[in-house]
Image (tube, rainbow, N blue to C red):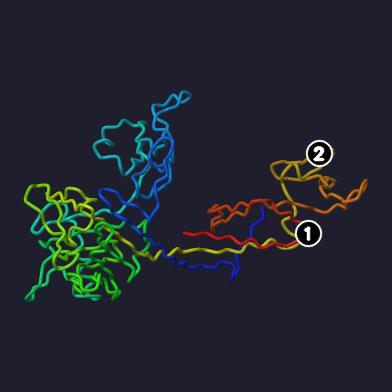
Amino acid sequence: MYLYKFEEGEVIVNTLTAYPSHNMYLYEQSVYLDGQAPLSGAYSANDTMVPIGDISLFELNINRPTVGQQWDASPASLIYPFTIKDSTLVALKTVTTGAFNSAEFGDSLTGSYPMSASISVDHIPEDAQGLGRKRIQSLRNSLDYYTYLSPEYTFLRADPGGWTKANQEIGLLNIPSIFYGSTLKKGSMNLRFYVSGTLVAQLHDEGRNGEMIQVGPTGSEGSGSVAGVVLYEEGCVLLTGSWDLKLDEDDTLHTENYLGAGDVAPQWTYFGTNLSGTTGGVSISTPSSSWAVSFEGTNRIPSIMMFANAPKNQLIHSNNPTYLLQASSSKNTVVTSSTTYVENPETVIKNIGSSSFLNYNEAFQKTTYISKVAIYDEKRNVIGVAKLANPVKKTANREFTFKLKLDI
């Protein structure tokens, strides 16, 4: 086995910065991602087998039957994660403590695929309690931290005309990190509200300081006002704009309040309420209306580039038995004892050189084929293996440099 140590300059660590962008359209109770229509599968309405607008996290169970085939004795043919309960007490995160404790040693603890992620919205009424308000409370430290960007982040503002987000009416938009990577890109968040295809209102963090300012249409109700803030690292948008959204001064749109309390005018705190359904005890639907979200992410991907050299006159011997000429097996004997290992000096290596001329044998030269490059740590433990698409012919007068790249 040949071992070489990486020299200075042969290992380069970089950080690749990508800017993924997404455009999501929210209509009724569906999310349409990047304008893509779902592809119908043979076993489901969406071939990824996740809700429309969701991202399949592991892209497993793509267009697979949900019940076993005739040749399959199992009750279902979907693949799933599992672990066996043993003394290590390792379990899947989806397995509850009660289920784990009641399982016997040797029992299989299972999960389910596919798993998916999508944006979600919460409408948290004023002075409401419960899970929604707890989520706002959990963001208090983050909100106060971002006050260096804008005072609009302040959780508790006691001056005249101030507020407290502890009981303020809020629309909370949650974006999973799988959509944007490391952080949301400043100046890219854009929210829009449409009615019958007409743009009624638009928010944009044009100041790159997290303030969601209503920028359009020009002269619209609330134009120039701050309707919320963006938490760039956490992937959240808190909307507090409570003014009525109108097509013009004489025309006020209305949402339907299914609790029978009458119609209420739409506002930014109701963003995506068609998607969220019942939240905070209120079920709101905006007829003929839709919402849109567009943003860019900043995804920093650490990468390691390694240059593995295959020098001349090296890496031209193999311990594979096929490296030797089998016809001379009598000369391939090895003498071993507790203190000795001796190979026959007359061992013949197979000549695999080929000639372009008829009835002519190419002169012998030691030849190997490199098909893999293994990376070891300082204790000679294999930590990675790079496989070549096609083996490379190595002779004494040839040298190669293999470029290995790993994205972390």
What residue is disc 1 on? 396
Nearest to the observer: residue 24 or residue 105: 24
Question: Is residue 133 visible to the viewer in this orientation of the structure?
Answer: no
Nearest to the observer: residue 21 or residue 85: 21
- Which residue, as the protein is rendered here, is positioned at the far right? 359
Left or right: residue 167 versus residue 176 is left
x then y, percent, for residue 70: 46, 23
x then y, percent, for residue 4: 63, 61
Q: Which kind of residue does numbered mark 1 sit on?
A: Ala
x then y, percent, for residue 265: 13, 59
SS for callout 1: loop
| Residue located 24% across and 50% down the image | 275
Disc with the residue nearer the chain's start (1 vs 2): 2
Q: Which mark is residue 59?
A: none
What residue is disc 2 on? 326
Q: Which kind of residue does numbered mark 2 sit on?
A: Gln
Nearest to the observer: residue 262 or residue 268: 262
Counting other residues with Cα less than 10 Å from the Cα at mark 2, is it few (<14), some (14-19), or many (20 or more)? some
| Residue located 34% across and 32% down the image | 105
x then y, percent, for residue 59: 43, 46
As measured in the structure, the alpha-carbon distance from the residue carrying label 1 to the one carrying label 2 is: 23 Å
| Residue located 92% across and 47% down the image | 358
Q: In this view, does 10 lie above or below 285?
A: below
Left or right: residue 385 versus residue 170 is right
| Residue located 34% across and 41% down the image | 91
Nearest to the observer: residue 342 or residue 171: 171
SS for callout 2: helix
Counting other residues with Cα less than 10 Å from the Cα at mark 1, is it few (<14), some (14-19), or many (20 or more)? some
